[in-house]
Amino acid sequence: MLVAESAVSDFMAGHFAGGATDVRPLAAGEWSRAYAFVLDGRQAVIRFGDHIGDFRKDQVMAARSSPALPVPAILDIGSAGDGYFAVSERASGGPLDDLDSAGMRAVLPRLLAALDAMRDMGLPAARGYGMWAPDGTAPARSWAESLLAVNQETARLPGWRAALARSPAGAATFDRAYARLRQLTQGLPDERHMIHRDLLSRNVFVQGADITAVIDWGNATYGDWLYDAAWLIHWWPHFPQWRDIDIAAELERHWLQQGTPVPDRHRRLEACLLHIGLDLMSYAAYRGRWDDLSRLAEQISARHHTQ
């Protein structure tokens, strides 16, 4: 359970023994609530959430921060009420989501370089695909198995299948799209790279043409590096200010310029896009967001011809 708004000031005063000042709420995410503050003269952010594993994963990635993929240092993690908190350095700049077209064009080379940095990042020797735990392990034996697990309920999203069955959109679109995903994953290569899996959503901070921080690694996954490219392709139409930028074409141009081989990219991208859509459908059903669910069902049917 998240720390109640009314209890934040008391927690801050008690935990930091008067060293925390200028506490201000920031935008809340789906799984945590964040506040900016000054800690002993240093700009910082504290987040409260129910899942300490998400904060531990941020800590893992902060230790692997690089100029191309900057991740704020985690200063403290602990318990708060019935949940948990994490304190991190505060990144300069603002969210990528707020950029206009000119701003996005300026920062796009750095964004694509950040995707390259994740692709080229070495991973733990232990095998495993899918959402990894703070100890570096991941549950699936293959990338295909990880993608196909999208039809399973998890401890974080219990009951979504029953909710989907009761929804106006129903489960038919989900089931047809899942059948298409099963076809696409046959013989899919076992690419194993770092995937953020939640780019945008105010998780990338920029200043001018530079990326200053990539935050919130709770959904980070091992698998095909094209997944984050698919994530951008999926969400790009939701930002009308970027409609004059063809992100799919920009990605293709970048890979060509970098000499990056992308074999079987159309099938790999479609598999990632289908997984993204199905995963978002399960989340919308869990939250009871029927309008979002209907929109996703229509989008999946149109994009993947699963009517």
Image (cartoon, rainbow, N blue to C red):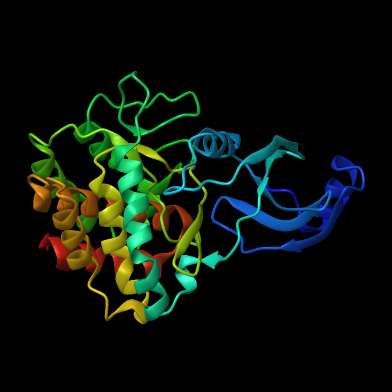
Compared across the picture, whether 164 is left or right of 226 comes to right
Query: Based on the displayed image, in which of its 4 quarters is residue 29 positioned?
Result: bottom right
In the image, residue 58 above or below residue 105: above
The one of 150 and 125 positioned closer to us in this rendering: 125
Residue 150 drawn at (x, y percent): 30, 42
Residue 255 drawn at (x, y percent): 18, 54
Q: Residue at x 15, y 47 (%)?
A: 268
Compared across the picture, whether 296 is left or right of 54 comes to left
Residue 40, visible in the rendered structure: yes
The one of 149 and 195 positioned closer to us in this rendering: 195
Residue 169, visible in the rendered structure: no
In the image, residue 103 above or below residue 233: below
Compared across the picture, whether 200 is left or right of 298 comes to right
Q: Residue at x 21, y 59 (%)?
A: 254
Q: Residue at x 57, y 35 (%)?
A: 59
The one of 53 and 7 positioned closer to us in this rendering: 53
For the view shown, which residue lies furthest in the top direction?
126
Residue 12 drawn at (x, y percent): 83, 48
For the view shown, which residue lies furthest in the right direction?
18
Q: Give the quarter of the figure containing the C terminus.
A: bottom left
The one of 122 and 129 positioned closer to us in this rendering: 122
Compared across the picture, whether 79 is left or right of 290 comes to right
Q: Give the quarter of the figure containing the N terminus.
A: top right
Residue 210 drawn at (x, y percent): 46, 62
What is the total number of numbered labels drawn onto the structure image?
0
